[in-house]
Image (cartoon, rainbow, N blue to C red):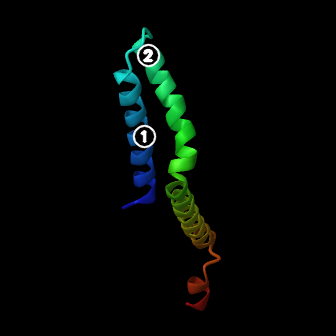
């Protein structure tokens, strides 16, 4: 599975779990306040619980950006006429 999708679904699942726990707690607090607390709690927990997935996602994004940068540089070189294949012809 794509690390970006896995990490995003993990973050969403963590938020839903925190929200369900806080909504189930009987307290005289507005539901929007509970959802905001769940959001903050899930953000804090993701640094600990989803560390490996976050590192995998970062590595995946670095590889993707490096590949795109190479492709962009090749295209610019080809458009500028600096392509080695054209010089050999």
Q: Report x, y in % for residue 4.
A: 45, 54
Q: Decide: is 70 above or below 26.
A: below
**Residue placed at 42% from the left, 13% from the top?**
27
Q: Decide: is 48 above or below 35.
A: below
Q: Decide: is 47 above or below 65.
A: above
Q: Report x, y in % for residue 26.
A: 37, 16
**Residue placed at 38% from the left, 36% from the top?**
17
Count of residue discs: 2
Q: Quadrant of residue 88?
A: bottom right
**Residue placed at 53% from the left, 41% from the top?**
45
How far is disc 2 from disc 1 in space, using C-alphas? 17 Å
Task: Check the image and name the residue furthest to the bottom.
Answer: 88
**Residue placed at 38% from the left, 21% from the top?**
25
- Location of mark 1 (residue): 14
Front residue of 66 and 82: 66
Task: Say which label, 2 or 1, has the lower sequence index.
Answer: 1
Label 2: state its secondary structure. Answer: helix
- Location of mark 2 (residue): 32
Front residue of 70 and 9: 9
Q: Residues within 10 Å of mark 2 (few under 14, many from 20)?
A: few
Q: Quadrant of residue 11?
A: top left
Label 1: state its secondary structure. Answer: helix
Quarter of the image that includes the N terminus: bottom left
Q: Residues within 10 Å of mark 1 (few under 14, many from 20)?
A: many
Task: Check the image and name the residue furthest to the top.
Answer: 28
- Is 5 positioned to the left or the right of 36 in the image? left
Q: Report x, y in % for residue 6.
A: 40, 54
Q: Report x, y in % for residue 63.
A: 55, 66
């Amino acid at each position: 599975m794509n690390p970006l999708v896995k990490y995003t679904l993990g973050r969403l699942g963590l938020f839903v779990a925190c929200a369900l726990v806080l909504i189930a707690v009987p307290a005289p607090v507005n539901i929007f306040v509970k959802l905001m607390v769940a959001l903050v709690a899930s953000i804090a927990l993701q640094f600990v619980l989803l560390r490996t997935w976050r590192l995998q996602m970062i590595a995946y994004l670095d590889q993707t950006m490096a590949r795109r940068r190479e492709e962009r540089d090749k295209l610019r070189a080809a458009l500028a006429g600096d392509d080695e294949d054209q010089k050999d012809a």
